[in-house]
Image (cartoon, rainbow, N blue to C red):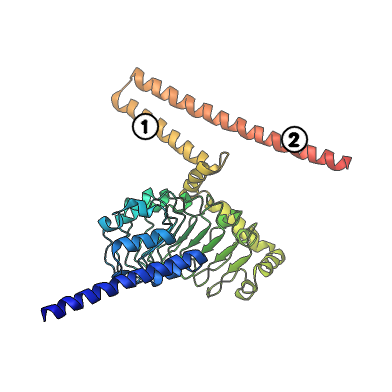
């Protein structure tokens, strides 16, 4: 009986080795053909392959696929066992598992460009992602996120999928200035930031949320081609959004209270929406008045401050913010003078604060005057050239 057990063990080991050899042969053949690598790796039975073979396979194909393996966690020691095998891995797939975080193991994948962690139970992300300086695409859809993970804001992301979560705000998204595609559909969003710093954004999906209006500032995005705002609570589409420079597809179906433009007009496409606004200029003027009124609120001011970091020039929001800061500074100094009595140091601080505020206001006015002179000169040049022609 003991000999039979030994024989069985030998047969099982030989079968395992044969399976590994066949898997490696299939990978090698696929590499030679140059096709189907990602799907091939996804079909490999990693449970029967030892860790070394799995990592060699991942390094050869450029994709480490651990999808659909009922994983609760990923062993850091396992993934980081041989860093040399990880240099050529560009895709990391841990989708369809039971993970509550993307493990710190991901920190070893320095060259990874795409992470798929969809269909898990993720509520937050580890800081290990911060070291992935090549990461441009991440899929966190179908998880349990209630807010945007802050670690994402330090990454050079171009494509982000956060759909089917429980997000209530998109605070921080304007910091992703390289973003081209953003999917936040099927969440709990009630409003959107202006996103004016996301100048490369081409596709924005906000379907199936609780939005009651779209920011008119979306119309200033120079690259926005597709906006899906279907199945929300919209009552109107701003003229600026309908006439955005690059907009080609505007989806607003499933908004039962949409009245401006009428639902049937919006369903016909962007061209019909623009024609409707041309025929109803008063609707467009109402949007402009609302936008101007909204630009004086606190949110607009802070949007202006954020935008000033990424855009040249000085905007109104930044000027208001600076004025408030100086006002608070002067009030604080005056309060200090009242509290401690006459003091040469307080008087000097007050004089310096007022002087700095006045000099900054003068400097900004000169800049604006110079910009106006430049615009006038350009206009006169254009007129002169037109007459010459």
Q: Are marks 2 and 1 in contact (CB under 8 Å)?
A: no
In the image, which is nearer the foreground, mark 2 or mark 1? 2
234 relative position to 100: left or right: right
Tell me which residue sits at (71%, 38%) in the image: 375
18 relative position to 9: left or right: right
Is 44 placed above or below 175 here? Answer: below
193 relative position to 381: left or right: left
Viewer-proximal residue, 85 or 353?
A: 85
Q: Quadrant of the C terminus?
A: top right
Q: Secondary structure at mark 1?
A: helix
Tell me which residue sits at (61%, 67%) in the image: 249
71 relative position to 158: left or right: left
**Toward which corner of the image does residue 10 lie, by quadrant?**
bottom left
Callout 1: few (<14), some (14-19), or many (20+) C-alpha neighbours within 10 Å? few
Viewer-proximal residue, 144 or 160?
A: 160
Please give the residue where the numbered disc 2 appears in the rendered image: 377
Is 13 placed above or below 204 here? Answer: below
Q: Secondary structure at mark 2?
A: helix
**Can residue 27 be seen here?**
yes
Percent x, y for residue 376?
Answer: 73, 37
Q: Which of the two labelled residues, at mark 2 and mark 1, occupies the earlier sequence position?
A: 1
Q: Residue furthest top?
A: 344
Tell me which residue sits at (42%, 67%) in the image: 27
Tell me which residue sits at (69%, 62%) in the image: 281
Callout 2: few (<14), some (14-19), or many (20+) C-alpha neighbours within 10 Å? few
Q: Quadrant of the N terminus?
A: bottom left
Please give the residue where the numbered disc 1 appears in the rendered image: 332
Percent x, y for residue 322?
Answer: 48, 37
Viewer-proximal residue, 130 or 257?
A: 130
């Amino acid at each position: 009986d003991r000999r039979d057990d030994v024989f069985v063990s030998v047969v099982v080991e030989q079968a395992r080795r044969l399976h590994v050899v066949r898997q490696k042969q299939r990978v090698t053949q696929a590499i030679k053909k140059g096709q189907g690598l990602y799907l091939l790796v996804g079909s490999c039975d990693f449970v029967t392959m030892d860790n070394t073979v799995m990592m060699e396979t991942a390094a050869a194909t450029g994709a480490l696929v651990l999808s659909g393996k009922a994983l609760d966690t990923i062993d850091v020691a396992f993934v980081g066992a041989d860093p040399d095998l990880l240099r050529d891995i560009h895709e990391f797939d841990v989708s369809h598992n039971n993970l509550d975080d993307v493990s710190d193991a991901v920190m070893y994948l320095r060259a990874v460009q795409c992470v798929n962690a969809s269909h898990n139970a993720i509520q937050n992300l580890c800081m290990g992602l911060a070291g992935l300086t090549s990461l441009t695409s991440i899929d966190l859809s179908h998880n349990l996120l209630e807010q945007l993970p802050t670690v994402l804001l330090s990454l050079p992301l171009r494509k982000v999928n956060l759909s089917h979560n429980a997000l209530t705000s998109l605070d921080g998204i304007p910091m992703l200035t390289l973003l081209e595609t953003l999917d936040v559909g099927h969440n709990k969003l009630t409003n959107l930031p202006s996103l004016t710093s996301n100048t490369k954004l081409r596709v924005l999906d906000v379907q199936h949320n609780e939005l009651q209006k779209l920011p008119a500032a979306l119309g200033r995005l120079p690259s926005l081609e597709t906006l899906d705002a279907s199945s929300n609570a919209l009552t109107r589409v701003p003229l600026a959004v309908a006439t955005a420079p690059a907009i080609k597809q505007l989806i607003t179906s499933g908004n039962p209270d949409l009245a401006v433009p009428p639902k049937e007009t919006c369903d016909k496409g962007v061209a019909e929406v623009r024609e409707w606004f041309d025929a109803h200029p008063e609707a467009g003027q109402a949007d402009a008045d609302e936008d101007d009124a909204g630009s004086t609120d606190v949110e607009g001011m802070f949007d202006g401050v954020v935008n000033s970091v990424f855009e040249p020039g000085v905007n109104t929001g930044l000027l208001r913010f600076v004025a408030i800061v100086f006002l608070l500074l002067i009030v604080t100094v005056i309060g200090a003078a009242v509290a401690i009595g006459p003091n040469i140091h307080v008087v000097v601080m007050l004089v310096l604060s007022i002087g700095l505020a006045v000099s900054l206001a003068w400097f900004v006015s000169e800049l604006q005057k110079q910009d106006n002179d430049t615009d006038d000169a350009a206009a006169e040049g254009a007129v002169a050239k037109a007459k010459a022609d």
